[in-house]
Image: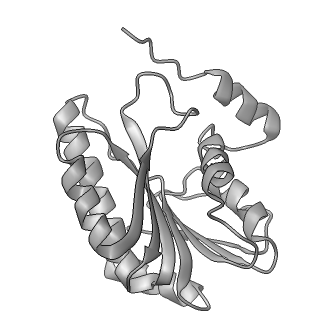
Amino acid sequence: MVTYQRKDSYYHKAKLAGYRSRAAYKLIELQKRFKLIKKGMQVVDLGCAPGGWLQVAAKYVGSSGCLVGVDRLAVPALDFQQVKILQGDVSDAATIAELQASLTRPADLLLSDMAPDTSGVGFADHARSLELVEIVIDLASQILKPSGGMVAKAFDGPDLNELIMRLKDSFEEVKRLKLKSTRKGSRELYLIARRHKA
């Protein structure tokens, strides 16, 4: 049985590097592999608390880009002029309207590190994680430009392939990836979807 370690090597690396969470290394790993974020992009980060992905993405989009983070929790401001942080629920129409108003054009990339409040019941957590990805897919149809991309976290399980088929209806290319920076024993993986068919 794998022992869960909250303070693993990535946790300590994040502290030393000044990142707000170890999750920053997940986005760094995704970026190295797929080159998702480019300077000047309009990027949306869903489930952005406490801000680790925002810190990483802000450097990649640069001062000419726009990065909007959304979370139900309050997230302290970051010292990047290209970053805007909204507090709200992405399934709420008012939050979506505020998000759209924060972008100067349709988004190039939609990132989601959202995860459900886990119950410890594997299938229930899996199902709820897929529901969150469904919300992201629906949001992509509203704010993502044609040819745009999407990354979303999900928990592995029996219904994942069905969700991937739905993603393939909306994107030309879909990949699934287990990251090296994911904690040992975790069932989380990331779905990388490219070239939106909007």
Residue sticking out furthest to the top: 1
* Residue 48 percent across, percent down from the top left: 54, 57
- Residue at image position (73%, 43%) is 19
In the foreground, 31 or 188: 31
In the foreground, 78 or 130: 130
Above or below — where is 108 with respect to 88?
below
In the foreground, 198 or 62: 198
For the N terminus, the quadrant is top left
Above or below — where is 31 with respect to 103?
above
Above or below — where is 121 with respect to 47?
above
Does residue 92 appear anywhere in the picture?
yes
Q: How many labels does the image show?
A: 0
Quadrant position of residue 53 = bottom right
In the foreground, 172 or 25: 172
- Residue at image position (39%, 38%) is 188
For the C terminus, the quadrant is bottom left
- Residue at image position (71%, 70%) is 38
Tell me the colour scheme of the image: one colour
Q: In this view, does 84 lie to the left or right of 180?
A: right
- Residue at image position (38%, 72%) is 171
* Residue 28 percent across, percent down from the top left: 67, 48
Does residue 51 appear anywhere in the picture?
no
* Residue 3 percent across, percent down from the top left: 44, 11
Quadrant position of residue 81 = bottom right
* Residue 107 percent across, percent down from the top left: 54, 81
Q: Is residue 37 left or right of residue 70?
A: right
Q: Is residue 131 left or right of residue 183?
A: left
Residue sticking out furthest to the front: 172
